[in-house]
Amino acid sequence: MADDQLSRAFTALADPTRRDIVARLSLGDATPGQLAEPFAMSLQAVSKHLKVLEEAGLISRTRDAQRRPCHLETAVLDEMTAWVDRYRRNAEERFRRLDAVLAAMDDDVQENHEDQQHEQDEGVASP
Amino acid sequence: MADDQLSRAFTALADPTRRDIVARLSLGDATPGQLAEPFAMSLQAVSKHLKVLEEAGLISRTRDAQRRPCHLETAVLDEMTAWVDRYRRNAEERFRRLDAVLAAMDDDVQENHEDQQHEQDEGVASP
DNA sequence: CGCTTTCTCAACCGATTGGTTGACAACAAC
DNA sequence: GTTGTTGTCAACCAATCGGTTGAGAAAGCG
């Protein structure tokens, strides 16, 4: 995915109003008027938010007379989770390997102790 | 998760420099100096980015003499994917049900080509 | 046709963002 | 001590953001 589209997507979801709109649209398509109703702001402000969401590829809009129904698109959501998950898994895999190394070192220590003093493990927590 | 912390997290990842930093840190801890090296910007600018990431809970910092090594924290990444995935699955489940309705209507149409018309229900869609 | 509904566009405004430079704090090393 | 390395803090600046109001486009309805 193009870098700036990912930026647009994260920027779009950085605003609580736009996250609320996405949450609402996940339940079904809605017009700008319907989407604006729960908010204490002008319809124009909501219209701007919808434009941001549309340019991020998170929603699409069709036409129905004067109405412009909004539809949630899931593809960009997929790419966002893909990005986040990639680096989360990178990091967790690295921690897993580090734990293995620490466990091996622990075994060494125990072997060096003639008598083995036993398990005191799981240095999982953060510093 | 607190609303504004989710906002901070999305805001943090909205910047390409900060996403690069997260990607780098997913491979292992690094100091601000090491993180700044690949970028055509001052160390101070990178320091600011790190502050944003830290306030979003995406990284933590320890101390090692003058150095302040940065460590990627995965918990907030988890919460981000959880949020995105929730509404993505909401929407996809809805589409799945809509498809089922359309398929049922299709069946009706075919049945109508001989005999009786069946009941057609499930007002799933919005207005 | 004129009138209403629905929505977007344009201009404006204060707050925030992402960068800069300069000063300096903390620590190591000489 | 003094010097050098590493990093943060503070002030500043242009650009962007999230809201406002006002004007008008697009469509249905009397």
Image (cartoon, coloured by chain):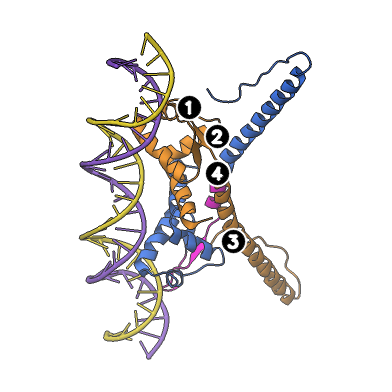
Chain colours: A orange, B blue, C purple, D yellow
Residue A19 is left or right of residue B88, and the answer is: left
Q: Quadrant of the N terminus of chain A?
A: bottom right
Q: Evaluate whether residue A16 shows in this view.
A: yes
- The local secondary structure at tag 4 comes to helix
Against B25, residue C4 (above or below) is: above
* B38 with respect to B108 (left or right): left
> Percent position (x, y) of residue B13?
47, 54
Taking A35 as reference, is A82 above or below it?
Answer: below
Q: Disc 4, disc 2: CB below 8 Å?
A: no
Nearest the viewer among B35 and A30 is A30
Give me the C-alpha separation between circle 4 and circle 2.
11 Å
* In this rendering, the label closer to the viewer, 1 or 2: 1
Find the distance from the CA under tag 1 to the CA under tag 4.
Answer: 29 Å
> Residue A13 at what x, y percent from top left?
46, 44
Which is nearer the N-term, disc 1 or disc 2? 2
Residue B25 screen position, x and y as percent: 52, 64
Q: Is residue B78 magenta?
A: yes
Asked if disc 1 and disc 2 are in contact, CB closer than 8 Å, the reply is no
| Residue type, numbered disc 3 | Ala
What residue did someone put label 4 on?
A: B84
Query: Left or right: where does residue A126 sit relative to residue A15?
Result: right
Mark 2, secondary structure of its residue: loop
Q: Nearer the viewer, mark 3 or mark 4?
A: 4
Task: Identify the disc placed on residue A64.
Answer: 1
Q: Which residue is mark 2?
A: A26
Amino acid type of disc 4?
Val
Q: Dot 3 lies on which element?
A: helix
Q: Residue B126 placed where, x, y %?
A: 54, 25
